[in-house]
Image: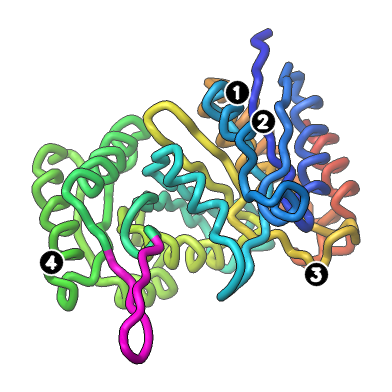
């Protein structure tokens, strides 16, 4: 048995609750994992006066793999997003968001199977905002280097995973230089992958088409802002953010996280849906070449959702977080 050492952040709000259940899942899969555990986000800020303690940063550098529960970021005030900070700090330029129908009982659409490749380090998310005489403006940054690497990653991933169609999303009709650059690089790179069908769509049209015909799409590559919007929209197609995992990938370091928030309104009530975090754990296992265990976990979750007997409140049931986990473990 391989022994793994990963950095673990239990997060804020419901984070500690779903982290505890994730550990139970890993134990039930027979994994030997040692955890370096740290506070980050709001709890770390209150305790240490910093969002991400230096020891936590060093742990990620050493372990190369981290699993992160959701953290709190105040809207419109206070400290900057921890998620954005980590992505920039470790140059995690790929936000990989698989969106798939796990169960027709909780999904709005059948047979959705979509991968979104979101550029993760530039665009408006650099957070550069400046004051004008009567307000503020934000700088949108799109570069050749970072556009090339996310688009190349997307095509290479598709070849490796036997996917066949990719759509580039942009607003190049209005943003002719920034989004125009991203689109032109996509059009250049696609010529190296003739075996993959490729097209492009303007972001507003793409949102409508995803709602009308989600099964028409296989993979999407997009700059940071559009990738963020489309990822949450697509999660709604299959049952919501409670079912949406993600991976933040760089050349050497990977951080896996559920994409939903810390849900402070239900903190401590024991009713949080841990599915997205479990699926993020499955992504981590695939990254660690534990594909068989990852598949077992995904199949167990699918079986629980298909049976529909033990579901959390957001999925239309009455089960506690622990009871839901117990049911998944019983299928393992």
**Residue placed under numbered mark 3 in the picture:** 265
Determine if the magenta segment contains residue 137. Answer: yes
Q: What element carries label 3?
A: helix
Q: Residue at x 13, y 51 (%)?
A: 185
Q: Looking at the rendering, in which quadrant would you find the C terminus?
A: top right
- Pointer 4 with pointer 3, Cβ within 8 A: no
Say which of 112 and 249 sits in front: 249
Camera sees residue 240: no
Camera sees residue 157: yes
Q: What element carries label 2?
A: helix
> Measured from the top left, where is residue 1 in percent x and y?
68, 8
Query: On screen, 148 above or below 211?
Result: above
* Among the 4 quarters of the image, the one containing residue 10: top right
**Which stretch appears magenta?**
127-140
**Residue placed under numbered mark 4 in the picture:** 177
Q: Which residue is drawn at 71% across and 59% down?
A: 262
């Amino acid at each position: 048995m391989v022994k793994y050492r990963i950095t673990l952040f239990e997060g804020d709000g419901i984070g500690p609750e779903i982290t505890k259940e994730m550990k139970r899942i890993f134990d039930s899969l027979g994994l030997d994992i040692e955890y370096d555990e740290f506070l980050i986000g709001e709890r770390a800020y209150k305790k240490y006066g910093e969002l991400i303690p230096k020891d936590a940063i060093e742990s990620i550098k050493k372990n190369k793999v981290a699993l992160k529960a959701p953290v709190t970021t105040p809207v419109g005030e206070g400290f900057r997003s921890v998620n954005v900070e980590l992505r920039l700090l470790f140059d995690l330029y790929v936000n990989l968001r698989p969106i798939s129908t796990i169960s027709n009982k909780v999904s709005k659409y059948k047979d959705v199977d979509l991968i979104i490749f979101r550029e993760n380090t530039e665009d408006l998310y650099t957070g550069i905002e400046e004051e004008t005489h009567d307000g503020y403006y934000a700088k949108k940054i799109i570069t050749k280097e970072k556009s090339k690497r996310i688009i190349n990653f997307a095509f290479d991933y598709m070849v490796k995973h036997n996917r066949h169609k990719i759509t580039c999303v942009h607003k190049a009709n209005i943003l002719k230089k920034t989004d125009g650059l991203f689109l032109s690089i996509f059009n250049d790179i696609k010529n190296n992958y003739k075996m993959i069908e490729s097209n492009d769509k303007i972001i507003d049209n793409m949102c409508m088409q995803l709602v009308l015909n989600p099964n028409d799409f296989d993979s999407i590559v997009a700059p940071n802002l559009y990738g963020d919007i489309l990822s949450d929209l697509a999660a709604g197609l299959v049952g919501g953010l409670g079912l949406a995992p993600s991976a933040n990938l760089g050349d050497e370091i990977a951080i896996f996280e559920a994409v939903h928030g810390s849900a402070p309104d239900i903190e401590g009530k024991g009713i949080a849906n841990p599915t997205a975090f479990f699926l993020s754990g499955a992504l981590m296992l695939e990254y660690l070449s534990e594909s068989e265990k990852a598949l077992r976990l995904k199949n167990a979750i699918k079986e629980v959702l298909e049976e529909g007997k033990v579901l959390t409140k957001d999925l239309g049931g009455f089960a506690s977080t622990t009871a839901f986990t117990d049911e998944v473990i019983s299928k393992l």
